[in-house]
Image: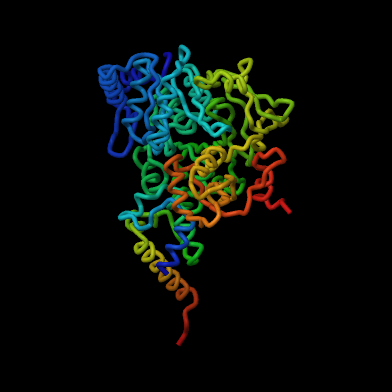
Amino acid sequence: MNCLEDYIRLHAAKQPEKVALICNDDRLTYADLNKSVDARVANLRNQGYSPGKVVCLRAEASAAFLVTYFALHRIGCIPAPLEQDMPQHVFEAVEAGLHRHSCPEGTADVLYTTGTTGRSKGVMISTDTIIANAENLIEGQGFTPELAFVINGPLNHIGSLSKVYPNILLGATIIIVDGLKNLDRFFDAFELLDTKYATFLVPASIRLLLQFSQKRIASLADKIDFIETGAAAIAENDMQALCRLLPHSRLYNTYASTETGIIATHNWNNGNCTSGCLGKPMPNSQVFITDDGLIACKGRTLMTGYIGDPEQTNSILRNRTIYTADLGSIDSNGCLHLKGREDDIINVGGFKVSPTEVEEAALSYPAVRDCICTSTPHAITGQALKLIVVLHEGEILDKRALALHLRKKLETYKVPMIYQTADKIQRTFNGKINRKYYRQEANGHTQ
Amino acid sequence: MKDKIRKLLEDALPLVDFDAPFLFSELDSLGVTTILMILADEFQVTMEATDATPRNFKNIDSLQSLVSRKLREREKQEEVKSPTNP
């Protein structure tokens, strides 16, 4: 067995009637899934798709997306799943950029992640990395073939896409729900099969469910085997609330990123409900802390590199080690603890945003003379983006018009919720935006 | 009440067109939650996830109806808690 698609074929032969995938009205057994993937392979080959080709596709929450994703792998193509609401001109620019570069042998996916410079970076993931991530999750969190896993997040992000890996490897069931907008639909997913369930929820989604659905979470206490969170910091109050509602479920906080893969995980419903604790490294991973206090990772789950950008690759990947911008420590029990980030990236409910990209887009709005994108505390997402603008003389801030302008250039999660005008933007002595000043202001530390 | 709801929501969700023919389709999960939170805070009513239905979130009018219904429920509960004797 070399890749996920081999496991689809294996399960189609061994347990053809087992439900592999449920999404809206689609319910595919492993036999159906294998057949659909083969049909899609034939269809794509007829369209001229051949091994080694990098293929951009919108990561829709649908069975069709996963069938195409698996079919591309089976042909030997390299899928590059992109945000489903990405503006078309950005999609085309990414596609054009990708076609200028090739990937090394063994590359399975190109996943896009936010870069500090404001430009997204294409992270190359190998077939072996996918299997190594699957093995880490199976060993670290106890995935089983009987499990039904509810995926509710975007399938172009490692948090959700990585949950496809162990479930397919084991022959378990994947249920796809398009976000948490319709909470009834999300909760209904846990009634579809008579089995144990698991799901991945970013901390913002946990906060959302705790705010409005405590009774319904509690009603699922006997069904939920485990819940995993990650991608952003979760508040200790929310961790404790979930322990009270789901006393018998395992609740995992995981350290992972597109570049490092799935590294470490901690069950906080096991007597150690500590915010920031991310547990011990999983079997295919090793972690250490650099002299600067930054987290560094080794092992089979690491990316191959950034596509077409050896310089950026070398800046974080050296000697088979990824040096992250995450500040951390390892306690006497060998558990990893996350303490924050060293760079300017803002984490909005698990989505990482480069303020530079937002500022570039805002500066293209005619009324804006100068601006800074910063963050402000938010009840659900932990942090929300705030855009402070200096307007040209005589201009008035039309918040909605500016937001709509930004939406044309950026994905929805990158458009700030809060807007404010100012007479000037604070800069350092060499003219750079003084981000530290605004971070301190957000924390109430400026005078 | 309608104007107040509109102003509060437009301020919190600048990307959303509150005059759209079907407001629910304009929103993501964060938008739905934000609206529930704002209405709960502003009018001191209890909102549940089950209130986030396409019907309740059809437009500003239906949100106003939702709030009015919640206010009536709250009044009834308060009457039950402290019955006034003749």
Q: Quadrant of the N terminus of chain A?
A: top left
Residue nearest the observer in this picture, A147 or A154: A154
> Is residue A91 at least partly visible in the picture?
yes
Residue occupying the point 58% across, 40% down: A346
Whether residue A121 sits left or right of residue A404 in the image: it is: right
The residue closer to the viewer here, B84 or A415, is A415
Find the residue positioned furthest to the front: A393
Of A176 and A319, nearer the camera is A319
Q: Which residue is at a point 64% across and 35% down the rendered structure image?
A: A343
Q: Residue at x 69, y 53 (%)?
A: A444
Q: Is residue A20 above or below residue A194?
A: above
Q: Is residue A391 above or below residue A342?
A: below
In this picture the colour scheme is rainbow
Q: Is residue A380 left or right of residue A319?
A: left
Percent across and percent down for residue A401 are 44, 52
The answer to whether residue A269 of the structure is visible from this angle is no
Image mark count = 0
* Rendering coords of residue B61 (x, y %): 35, 64
Look at the picture and state if B1 lies above or below A408.
Answer: below
- Residue in front for this viewpoint, A367 or B23: A367
Q: Locate residue A316, reporting x and y percent.
A: 61, 23
Q: Residue furthest top?
A: A105
Name, please, the residue furthest toward the bottom: B86
Task: Assign the C terminus of chain A to one quadrant of the image.
Answer: bottom right
Q: Position of residue A191 (x, y in %)?
A: 36, 42
Q: Is residue A246 left or right of residue A43?
A: right
